[in-house]
Amino acid sequence: MRSSNPVFSRQGAFTRDTGYAGFGPSQSAGAHTPHTGYPHDQQPLSAEQLQQMYQAPPAGPLDTGRMTMDDVVARTAMTLLTLVAGGAVAWFALPAGGFGIPMVAALAAFVVGLVISFRRSVNPALVLTYAGLEGVFLGAISKALNTYLSGIAVQAVLGTAAVFAGMLIAYRSGRIRVTARYQRIGLAVAAGFLLLLVVNLVAALFGADMGLRSGPLGIVVGLLGIGLGAFFLSLDFHEIEQGIRGGAPEREAWRAAFGLTLSLVWIYLEMLRLIAILRGDD
């Protein structure tokens, strides 16, 4: 990134040879000329010319081709709407408890997500495809849990929205600052959390129960998972802010939407698990 300000990062926008921002080449040092208010070869404008300039329509905003917050909001809304549409299809079209199609969708979403992550250029079609596939998986899981715990899907959606709003307010107010140390600690905790989940999965395959799905330990793990999702959101907010300041291309708004969707999906799944543990212990 050439500059933290996308306006000043455009080459030729301003010149700074004299220490002042101005358009066009600056005068060389030592070339002193009497100040008349007009360039040497330009005559004062007539009253008619001034009137024409005054009546001319105002210039519209420049299309810089750079990512803006409006771009991020619009692309994220499209991605989340696609995810919700996929979830609605699974909710109304698939039987509760039938996990064949949802698991295939989850695996396909995982593969598409990896492709998006490792591609140098972001592809909007892939982002929307990921959202649709992930939506099918989430819709099926939500419907199955809602069959036994009525209203859990709505509770998880509201909880996810609350976490998102809380993190956005905390980040915008400066209460959360994404520093290098903050990132190192968060990523280390995330790595440990993922390792714990892998160990629990392997133990479950051999019939062992580590207690991560119920009881006090399950609640602690659920809260930790939601906290990590909030941490990922703060990283997303930071990257978006840096991208806008650095003049990232407009197309990168799709990558921002993908990152936000990943974090929200993580939080939603952890929220489902935590609520299921809490309601199951009642």
Image: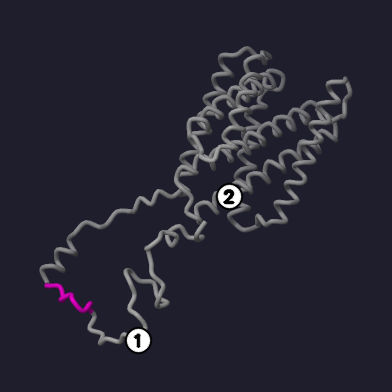
Q: Residue 200, position in %: x, y?
A: 83, 29
Number of labels in the image equals 2
Q: Residue at x 61, y 43 (%)?
A: 164
Q: Residue 199, position in %: x, y?
A: 83, 31
**Dot 1 corresponds to which residue?**
30
Instruction: Identify the disc placed on residue 239.
Output: 2
Whether 11 is among the magenta residues is: no
Q: Residue 37, position in %: x, y?
A: 24, 80
**Type of secondary structure dominating the magenta stretch:** loop
Label 2, label 1: how many angstroms apart (C-alpha)? 45 Å
Image position of 277 (left or right of 16): right
Image position of 274 (left or right of 266): right
Query: In what quadrant of the picture does the C terminus appear?
Result: top right
Q: Amino acid at mark 1?
A: Gly
Disc 2 element:
helix
Q: Amino acid at mark 2?
A: Glu
Q: Which residues are magenta?
A: 38-46
Of residue 89 and residue 1, the one placed in the foreground of this image is 1
Q: Residue at x 68, y 14 (%)?
A: 97
Q: Residue 27, position in %: x, y?
A: 33, 78
